[in-house]
Amino acid sequence: MEIPELTAPDAYVLSSEQLREIREVILRSVRFQLQSSSPEVIEDTTYDAVLGVLVFVRRNGLPDRLDKLATTIARNKCRDVMRRRKVWGHAVDVTEYADVVADAHALDWLVELEEGTTLIAARAAEYYRRHKAPCVELTVAVMMGKDFKELAAETNQSHDKLRQRWVRCKARLKAAIARGEPGLEGMPGWKGGVA
Amino acid sequence: MTDVHAWFRSCVPAHLLEVLPDSESARFLEHARECAECASLLKQAEKHFPEPWSGTAHLPLTLLGRWLNASESLSAPDRETIEAHLVACDECRTDLASLADAWDRGEIRARVAEIESRATRSPGVAPPSRAARPPIPLPRSRTRDWFTGGFIGALATAASFAIVWPMLHPTPSPSGHETTASGEAPTSPGGTATPGAATTTAPVTPPNVAPAPAAAPVLRSTPVTEFTSDLVRAPDGAPRKTVLDVKVTAHDTELYLKLEPPDAPDNEAIRVTIAGPDGSPLADERLPRSDFNGDRMFVFTQAKGFHAGVYRIMLARTRDAKSVTYSLRIRA
């Protein structure tokens, strides 16, 4: 596989001085919000948030108040850490970034995927909700990222049965997209859509 | 040719979520076979798929930023989806307001204000908090450490969430939970209980909302009020023990317990038994699993005050008797 070309930091439009400033702001915010966490977790989250600011600026332009943006992103990242910790305990706090190439193109691509999947998930859930389909809860749950084991425990249904239901849900959704039903406009494969 | 690549790129999220229609899917895979660049893009996306997708059902900040600054780059249905979500979701509106503060532009403030007014007119069903969302399934390697402890590890983890809060008031008061130096003999909330014997579980309202029930229960569940926000979180690095250690005074009649039951569906009952230091049964209740949710605590009442010693609290599933046992050591 071809290694993507690394992008110089100045492609992010932020000067070293600005980077140092936002790192300070983020570190302060993360230390406050994750005050009982280990230094490694705080460092990890700070790094994550600084990258988040860089990607945001690259995609949306430089805001008038960079510190406000940094604080918002830091708060968001801290909530993600808390969410992970809530179920998985403390052992999973340190994120493994070894595989993630920290260059602009790779980060842009990951952000694009996040945006795309979130929008599709929201559209699918909304479509089933509007049609009062029996699989709306299942769709919402799966699209939210719940795993089947967790769902099976919550709904007192067998793992296999839930998987089968989900396969049928997806098939119905795919068919609805292919038919070009209203509410799914613009989704890939929708009649008259992108394709 | 560029359009084909752009189309391929736009289809990747649908392909990952497995909702790409069959005809498109065939074309998509065919292009992946033909074009090395797109195949590499797809491979990268598949490799990192659970990571870019936060799985929180909340909108990523980059998307909110696009909606604020460059909404023309979004398609009309996508804009509608985002706006519908913003109207329904308080948390994303808070994020939006914070983001909007980063720009000193009138039109951005106007857009935020419009969403706020729409939300006021038609409040939707908001998704739960981002922090409370279930996580995406993580790769096995990340969770190995947690699992290696086996059952003991799981028990210890559950116990680390258990919080004991001594109530220093003889009776719950609307003003809070401040310490008292009163020398009056402690009384039960209702004043009619048989000390150390009654085992009633009543769905109760918080002490500062409604008066305590007439009977003095030994164990009851109560919604968490504001004071628990600091207590629910166990300090990082704290030793994980199954023994909950608490010091009480002669006037303490209530302990607030945050109990973590064994995994069970919400509609299954959990049997809670409490045995005193001398082994005598103090409570034996079947409570719905939903009573153990994060926003509820249990009030363990002893009308005549607590005797020092080790109390045993056992939470067991009714179906298969899988249980978690806590030792509650009370020091006078």
Image (tube, rainbow, N blue to C red):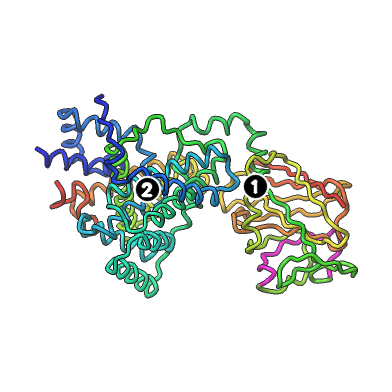
Q: Is residue B252 visible?
A: yes
Residue located at (18% from left, 52% from top): A179
Q: Which residues are magenta?
A: B192-208
Q: Position of residue B102 (x, y in %)?
A: 36, 59
Q: Is residue B9 left or right of residue B94?
A: left
The residue carrying mark 2 is A18
Q: Is residue A185 left or right of residue B288?
A: left
How busy is the neighbourhood of tag 2: few (under 14 within 10 Å), some, or many (20 plus)? Answer: few
Residue located at (11% from left, 39% from top): B2
Q: Identify residue type, mark 2.
A: Gln
Instruction: Chain letter for mark 2, please.
Output: A
Q: Identify residue type, mark 1.
A: Ala
Q: Position of residue B92 (x, y in %)?
A: 40, 59
Q: Is residue B218 visible?
A: no
In the picture, the disc for residue B234 is: 1
Indicate whether B77 appears above or below A167: below
Q: Residue furthest front?
A: A17
Q: Secondary structure at mark 2?
A: helix
Q: Nearer the viewer, residue B147 or A5?
A: A5
